[in-house]
Image: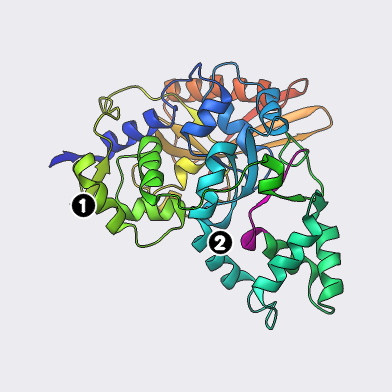
Amino acid sequence: MTPLGRRALNRATLERQLLLRRTDRSASEVVAHLVGLQGQDPDPPYLGLWNRITGFTVEDLARLLYGRRVVRATLFRGTQHLLAADDYLWIRPLLQPVQERVWRGHFQRALAGIDPVDLAAAARELLDGRVVPRPELGRALAERWPGRDPVALARSVQHLLPILHPPPDGLWRRHGPTPFTLAEQWLGRPLADRPAPGDLVLRYLAAFGPATVADVQAWSGLTRLREVVEELRPRLRVFRGEDGRELFDLPDAPLPDPDTAAPARFLALLDNVVLAHADRSRLMTDEQRAHVGWEPVLLVDGFVRGLWHLRRGRGEAVLTVRLFAPLSAAQQAEVAEEAAALLRFAAEGDRHDLRFRPVQE
């Protein structure tokens, strides 16, 4: 098996993630290629697409949400994602075991004594033909189960049923009550009966490979995928990582030269590229990993070199970059150029200020 070093894995992943150069592909094509965008908050998916698409605008994604071509829902690892509607219909039922595990871990104790089947049926009846804000749904469910936490009741529903959060939820800078609606009714189509987990593995490898079985499981939240990958083995190319583990990949997937230039990128908070592998050494050190998930990261030469934060107020936008180690003069100039582009996108009309600090401060 061909060995692949850390830098080769880095460049392969960045190529699949459209982070070596921006693409002219449409926002809908990119969302589908990436198998969704992590979207706990409304703004990060827009930044994720801006990082990858030439000339991307906020309206490009808003149109897809209103057009029901992209949906916002609880999916991978039990977290909010934006996904192509066509993909949601087969991926959501495939991830039902993940949703049930999350429900047990987060809500079973708080809702002890409530049959989840009864809770799902009550919620389905309340949502039938309607879009209901989460607080309203919680209050209605609490009328049936007095004394129970309305927030826990409502939040648990998105794990028990295929629920979508339609616009204006998911719009740029939009904050407010989360709307709930039944996926089949919003999309006018049924969910898949028997989705194939192998299809999800292949889609993952196209966007995140080469990767181990553990990597696929970390990204999806699914377990016991070794057997699925073994069935696919005749269709896959197999490499060996520096740690000796097998790395699986599509036979025709791109593998750039490890010395390919990688531009500076201000990744969105919780961008899936930094969460999608059990072993994240292709992008960061263990020390840096402790920060990922709490703050968005800066890539320089393809690797995590810092964290960033954008603060806006009173007509001024301050972009603070906290570095794990100093950059060279050329690297700092490259980061400053990309920072100026980010500020034009995310803080148009404001006065712009860029500041560099060490992470320790």
Residue 35 sits above or below residue 255 on the image = below
Residue in the picture at 50% in, 52% down: 193
Location of residue 119 by image quarter: bottom right
Q: Which residues are magenta?
A: 158-167
Q: Mark 1 near mark 2, Cβ–Cβ under 8 Å?
A: no
Q: Is residue 205 left or right of residue 347?
A: left
Question: Could you tell which of marks 1 and 2 lies nearer the N-terminus?
Answer: 2
Residue 6 sits above or below residue 80 on the image = above
Q: Is residue 86 left or right of residue 163?
A: left
Q: Is residue 312 left or right of residue 61?
A: right
Look at the numbered disc 2 and give the secondary structure of its residue.
helix
Mark linked to residue 99: 2
Q: Is residue 174 left or right of residue 26?
A: right
Residue position marked by numbered label 1 in the rendering: 243
Judge whether residue 160 is colored magenta.
yes
Residue in the picture at 83% in, 79% down: 147
Q: Nearer the viewer, mark 1 or mark 2?
A: 2
Residue 118 appears at what percent x and percent y?
70, 73
Closer to us: 334 or 103: 103
Closer to us: 235 or 352: 235
Judge whether residue 92 is colored magenta.
no
Residue 121 appears at what percent x and percent y?
71, 66
Q: Furthest residue to the bottom?
A: 113
The amino acid marked with disc number 1 is Asp
